[in-house]
Image: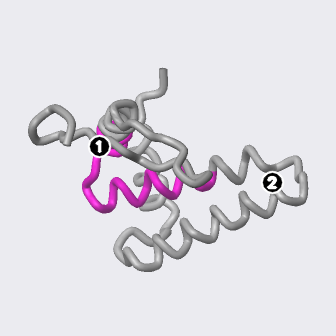
Amino acid sequence: MVDLEQLQKEVYQNKVNKGFNVTDINKEFCLTYGELSEAYDAWKKHKRDLGEELADVAIYLLGLSEILGINLEDEIKRKVYKNSKREYKIIDGVNTRVKEYDEDNKGDK
């Protein structure tokens, strides 16, 4: 299994080593958005580089997380667990959340 925490540090260090931005948070969000747009375009146009474009999105997220001091691996695990505890129902044709997991009380709210 991939160690996202280590990969996050490697992505950040590569940014530093290559002279890429590691201070302008607004710019990093915009660049991340740009990479997601490129991935969408690759999917929409059935381009062969879709996987590479998705990798770019992940790399930007990992780098941004390291810049912000957020352990993305821990956050993903926490969010996946939280999502698994939510309950949904189709209401008027829309999949709607009807039960939320309360992390503070470790139960439903």
Q: Quadrant of the C terminus?
A: top left
For the point 43% across and 44% down, the residue is 10
For the point 84% across and 59% down, the residue is 44
Depicted 38 relative to depicted 82: above or below? below
For the point 49% across and 69% down, the residue is 20
Residue 40 in the image: state x and y as whole percent.
73, 60
Question: Which is closer to the viewer, label 2 or label 1?
Answer: 1
Kindly identify the amino acid type of the residue bearing the numbered disc 1.
Glu
Query: Label 2 crowding class (10 Å Cα cut-off): few <14, some 14-19, many 20+?
Result: some
On the rendered structure, is 11 left or right of 101?
Answer: right
On the rendered structure, is 50 left or right of 58?
Answer: right
The span picked out in magenta is 56-76
Q: Of callouts 2 and 1, which one flags the residue occurring earlier in the amino acid sequence?
A: 2
**Residue at mark 1:** 100
Kindly identify the amino acid type of the residue bearing the numbered disc 2.
Trp
Residue 92 in the image: state x and y as whole percent.
57, 54
For the point 55% across and 71% down, the residue is 31
Indicate the secondary structure of the residue bearing disc 1.
loop
Q: Is residue 94 magenta?
A: no
Residue 61 in the image: state x and y as whole percent.
47, 55
Does residue 106 appear in the picture of this structure?
Answer: yes
**Residue at mark 2:** 43
- Kindly report the secondary structure that dominates the magenta region of the rendered protein: helix
